[in-house]
Image: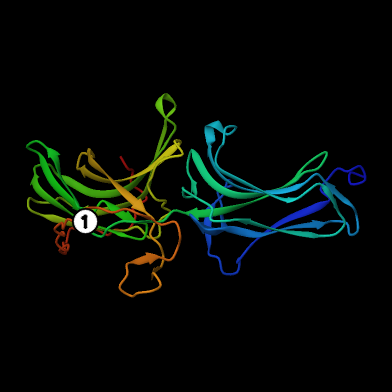
Amino acid sequence: MAMLFGFGQSAEIQIRLSNEDSRKVVKARGDDGNLHDNFLYYDGESVTGTVHINLKKANHKFEHQGIRIEFIGQIEVYYDRGNQQDFISLTRELARPGDLTQNAQFPFEFNNVEKPFETYMGTNVKLRYFLRVTVIRRLTDLTKEIDLVVHALSSYPDNDKSIKMEVGIEDCLHIEFEYNKNKYHLQDVIVGKIYFLLVRIKIKYMEIAILKTEIVGSGPNTFKESETVAKFEIMDGAPVRGESIPIRLFLAGYDLAPSMRDVGKKFSVKYFLNLVLIDEEDRRYFKQQEVTLWRKADKVMRRPGSDDEEPQTSIPGTQKFTAPSIEHPKPESPRSDPKSGSTSPDDNSDSS
């Protein structure tokens, strides 16, 4: 009866992307909290495919006032859901007003699309890219959306400077910690060492945590949320003066996004290495150090022409960051230490 009076959906919309069989698929968390398969794109890549309009009744006239497809990049802050920001909005008209009497296909192309930010699903904000098809009708439009995942690639010079700091409590504790660099790609290994220069308090154990901080908004409307991504106990027992503890943390396997700075003037994502010492009276001493995480291209290829030319990433849209050519001394290879603990995550202890 609803179909008789023009209500209900009398057609089904499908969006098929080009090269679906060969395009990489990655897991991304949806609004329902579950992981879903999405096709992966990079900055500068074209987005092409075909829209299929399948009629539910064969040889039945399907009237419409036009068919269009949009490519949208959008930031949505959860506490302000009615105010999404579209930083990309491209439209292609697929069909003028008319009638369909059989299933139809409409190819579409969005060539060399700029995708400046990485897809992100956070605690208080999300950034998504999606295709939306709209079939305009007199009463109720038909719409179909599919999400795409975008990875923002970067490259940094290998001679990244190391981090070396001294912290402590006067006449009680003095330690020096060193990390091999301050910028790590998402599959990297954090290598470092902790030196105990003065120990006059009884340390029970020591742990290091990777903290992720999400900052949304600005001024009085700023929301700051921190979570512990991973935690490791690196020492169990009291250290002595002159002792050194090696650190080796593997980032692969954790659900990490790159560091982000003022994305769309809406949000930032920062990461910190949090070193915590707990004494026998359960007092906690900690020191945080910010590090930058970035996404590295999977493959590297040489430009066609000459083997002597500089290699380039095989994926378009890679951002390259250069720095002055300065040689920094590399930290010593960590020595084995009987007091060094396992680097397996300690899920039962709290982070400061």
Nearest to the observer: residue 157 or residue 256: 157
Direction from residue 113 to residue 297 in the image, left or right: left
Residue that extends furthest to the front in the rendered view of this protein: 305
Residue at image coords 46%, 39%: 264
Q: Secondary structure at mark 1?
A: loop
The residue wearing badge 1 is: 180
Direction from residue 4 to residue 178 in the image, left or right: left
Residue at image coords 47%, 48%: 116
Give the quarter of the image for residue 327: bottom left
| Position above or below: 24 against 254 | below
Direction from residue 37 to residue 332 in the image, left or right: left
Residue at image coords 14%, 40%: 168
| Position above or below: 203 against 330 | above
Nearest to the observer: residue 265 or residue 351: 265
Direction from residue 224 to residue 47 in the image, left or right: right
Nearest to the observer: residue 327 or residue 91: 91
Q: Position of residue 56 (x, y in %)?
A: 84, 56
| Position above or below: 115 against 187 | above
Give the quarter of the image for residue 246: bottom left
- Classify the position of the N terminus by image quarter: top right
**Type of residue at label 1?**
Asn
Give the quarter of the image for residue 35: bottom right
Nearest to the observer: residue 266 or residue 205: 266
**Mark 1 neighbour density, 10 Å: few (under 14) some (14–19) many (20 or more):** many
Q: Position of residue 2 (x, y in %)?
A: 89, 44
Q: Position of residue 81 (x, y in %)?
A: 57, 34
